[in-house]
Image (cartoon, grey):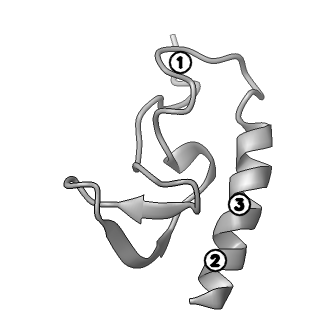
Amino acid sequence: IYVHTSLDGLKTDEEARVLDKDGRVVLGLFAAGEVVGGVFGKDRIGGGSLANCLVMGRISGRNAARS
């Protein structure tokens, strides 16, 4: 048995902004990739996070540069 990935993590919105436990945006904090949870539910196929990493990474980078 080995740890392949975490299926839980930071909650974000569609702009890759991190949300607090009450669903409010944490100003200046963005996240993407495997640190973000809830994308795949209870399981995922290895490599399945690559598209999310690329797309949300670009979004979070763009928004971080703007803020």
Q: Going from the N terminus, do you reach mark 1 or mark 2 first?
A: 1
Residue 8 in percent (x, y) is at 41, 34
Tag 3 near tag 2, CB within 8 Å: no
Label 1, secondary structure: give it.
Answer: loop
Q: Nearer the viewer, residue 1 or 59?
A: 59
Q: Residue at x 78, y 39 (%)?
A: 50
Q: Quadrant of residue 51?
A: top right
Residue at image coords 29%, 64% = 24
Q: Residues within 10 Å of mark 1 (few under 14, many from 20)?
A: few
Label of residue 2 in the image: 1
Q: CA separation, marks 1 and 2? A: 35 Å
Asked if the residue at tag 2 contacts the one at tag 1, i.e. Cβ–Cβ closer than 8 Å, the answer is no
Q: Position of 30 compared to 62: left or right?
A: left
Q: Which residue is mark 2?
A: 63
Where 67 sits versus 37, above or below?
A: below
Residue 12 higher or lower than 67, as above or below: above
> Label 1 sits on what residue type?
Tyr
Q: Is residue 23 left or right of residue 51?
A: left
**Disc with the residue nearer the chain's start (1 vs 3):** 1
The amino acid on which the numbered mark 3 sits, given as a three-letter code, is Gly
> Residue 16, percent across and down?
56, 60
Name the residue beneath numbered marker 3. 57
Describe the element under mark 3 as helix, strand or loop.
helix
Task: Note whether 51 is above or below 40 in the view shown.
Answer: below
Outermost residue toward the left?
22
Vertical comparison of 34 with 58: above or below: above
